[in-house]
Amino acid sequence: MIDLDLTEEQRLLEQSVREWGARAVAPKIRELDREHRFDRNILPQMAEMGLLGCSVPPEYGGAGMDYISLGIVSEELEYVDTSLRVIISVHAGLNCLSLLAWGTEDQKQRYLVPQAQGKKIATYGLTEPAAGSDVRGIQTVALKKGDRYFVTGEKMWISLADVADNFLVFAWTDLDKKRQRDTSGISAFIIERGFKGFSSATLKEKWGILAGNTGSFKMEDVEVPAENLVGKEGEGFKIAMFALDQGRYTVAAGATGLIRACRDASAAYALERKTFGQRIAEHQLVKEMIAGMESDYQASRLLWLRAGFLKNAGRRNTRETGLAKWFSTVASERCAGDAVQIHGANGYSDEYPVGRFYRNCKGAVIYEGTREIHKLMQADYVLGFRQDKATRCELPAIK
């Protein structure tokens, strides 16, 4: 049975993140977006609030919150701007929770603890210039020589590429399986920015999430100690898919926050703007669009709460998380489009936030599984073509 009421601790978290975002970030986000500038000063503030290690246990430097709390943080941050939620997605979701589930005790002490404390920033490196949804298409290789791996390749569309200290990187360790496109030949590694042969660059031609840092990184025979192999050789694909369960969850909750931001901005504008002698809030077609935003918000929130409930129980949630991510991101695109429409010509100007919402929402419809990939996944579940089997990579239950 799911209890839809938040606990007192969760409500306090929701309130504190909401107040911090409104006070510390909202007043300057338009300027940051205009200047295509990532504000690094946000990171220590998030660390101080315990957000960067939100669902990491205290023994590994985290705040020890449950996964519903992770969803709350994601929703509240994206309500202010998508760039804030992206930090949580790649650092806390894709990287930290993967190390929590798959890392050795040594890796947790050396990497997870400082990351959860916010002393180090982390991200995730799977996508490449010629490989996105098709993971089998990655070209990065890691060749073992003695007690070292030498990693060569390039990753693209990486959030925090020019900011992160640590990178969870996926590469082929079995070249025969690479030729066969057999994902059991992929492995996962922790790579530090300071490793020789590593370099990164910021992508400056983005259309949206302009206040966030996105880029690429290259590895030219980067020497990686064998103890930085995450899991066993050949488990990289499993780790990557596990990580996406966590990242997609934060994306789903974040998109829900963007829908709420579209709804609130549209309602406020509709109550002020007048046409044909009356407020546009009194026009039926405007009401229809605002009603659609409310419907999409409530449905999206229920979907990510359902996925969070399963995570708290330590149960497999790939299907539910994927559905939440697909529905909420597509809904956010619809709501952002309607928000611009309600604002009319003003919606086409960055004097109002809805244009930024519209630019920001599109990325989530593409990354961490395009809407088309998620459609196929959900159909395959219904048709019985796809079944998820539980593995040791499940997160610890939080009662």
Image (cartoon, helix red, strand yellow):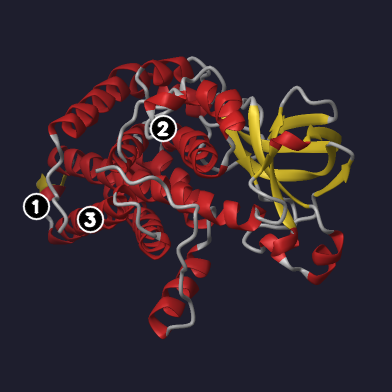
**Residue projecting furthest to the bottom:** 383
Q: Residue at x 42, y 77 (%)?
A: 381
Name the kind of residue labelled 3 in the image.
Answer: Leu
Q: Work out whether residue 107 or residue 167 is closer to the camera in this orientation and state it.
A: 107
Q: Secondary structure at mark 2?
A: loop
Q: Can residue 30 be seen at all in this image of the molecule?
A: no
Look at label 2 and name its amino acid. Answer: Val
Q: Position of residue 121 (x, y in %)?
A: 56, 25
* Sequence order check, earlier mark of 1 and 3: 1
Q: Is residue 298 visible?
A: yes
Amino acid bearing label 1:
Glu
User: Mark 1 against mark 2, which lies toward the viewer?
Assistant: 2
Label 2 Cα crowd, 10 Å radius (few <14 / some 14-19 / many 20+): many
390 left or right of 275 in image: right
Residue toward you, 374 or 122: 122
Does 146 sit above or below residue 33? below
- Pointer 2: what residue? 56
Residue under the image location 39 percent in, 42 percent down: 357
Label 1 – label 2 distance at C-alpha = 48 Å
Q: Quadrant of the N terminus?
A: bottom left
- Give the Cα distance between marks 3 and 2: 24 Å
The percent position of residue 2, horizontal first and vertical second, equals 16, 55
Residue 258 image position (x, y, % from top left): 33, 44
Q: Residue at x 35, y 52 (%)?
A: 314
Where does the image place residue 200, in percent across and percent down from the top left? 74, 31
| Residue where numbered disc 3 is placed | 302
Disc 3 crowd rating (10 Å Cα; few below 14, some 14-19, many 20+) is: some
| Numbered circle sitting on residue 247 | none
Residue corresponding to mark 1: 282
Q: Within the image, what quadrant is residue 355 found in?
A: top left
